[in-house]
Image: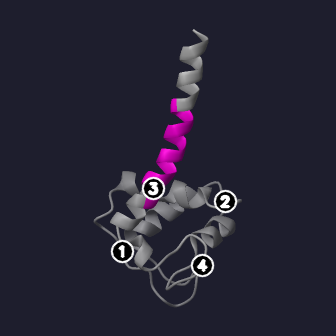
Amino acid sequence: MKAIRTLSLAVALGLASGAAMASADLAKAKNCMACHAEAKKLIGPAYKDVAAKYANDKDAVAKLSEKIRKGGVGVWGQIPMPANPQVSEAEAETLAKWVMSIK
């Protein structure tokens, strides 16, 4: 029984780190990395800066998910973020949660 619990914990930890990797892969697949990077500003803000800005906002994931899909302008300057209708609502939420996890 102890071996099963240990294996379950190892699988859970592996899935957690795999989810973070999968989200980075999703960001690449959806072309987010053309304008954003995890730690430095490109055309758009660094993901770590987005996470810091929204760190105390309980609605951050919902706001960022909507911004990912609908685009926007003005929060980070006058360069617009284009809409991304090819990103599903579930994918946008996954991406937003991943961004909020970046330190």
Front label number (2 vs 4) = 4
Q: In the image, what residue type sits under mark 4?
A: Lys
Is 1 situated above or below 13? above
Q: Position of residue 59 (x, y in %)?
A: 59, 56
Q: Which residue is mark 4?
A: 40
Name the amino acid type tagged 1.
Ala
Mark 4 lies on a secondary structure that is loop
Which residue is the site of mark 3? 23
Q: Amino acid at mark 3?
A: Ser
Quarter of the figure with residue 10: top right
The CA span between labels 1 and 3 is 19 Å
Residue placed under numbered mark 1 in the picture: 83
Crowdedness near tag 2: few (<14), some (14–19) or many (≥20) residues, C-alpha within 10 Å:
few
Q: Earlier in the sequence, mark 1 or mark 4?
A: 4
Up/down of 21 relative to 44, above or below: above
Label 3 – label 4 distance at C-alpha: 18 Å
Query: Amino acid type of disc 2?
Result: Asp
| Label 2 sits on residue | 57
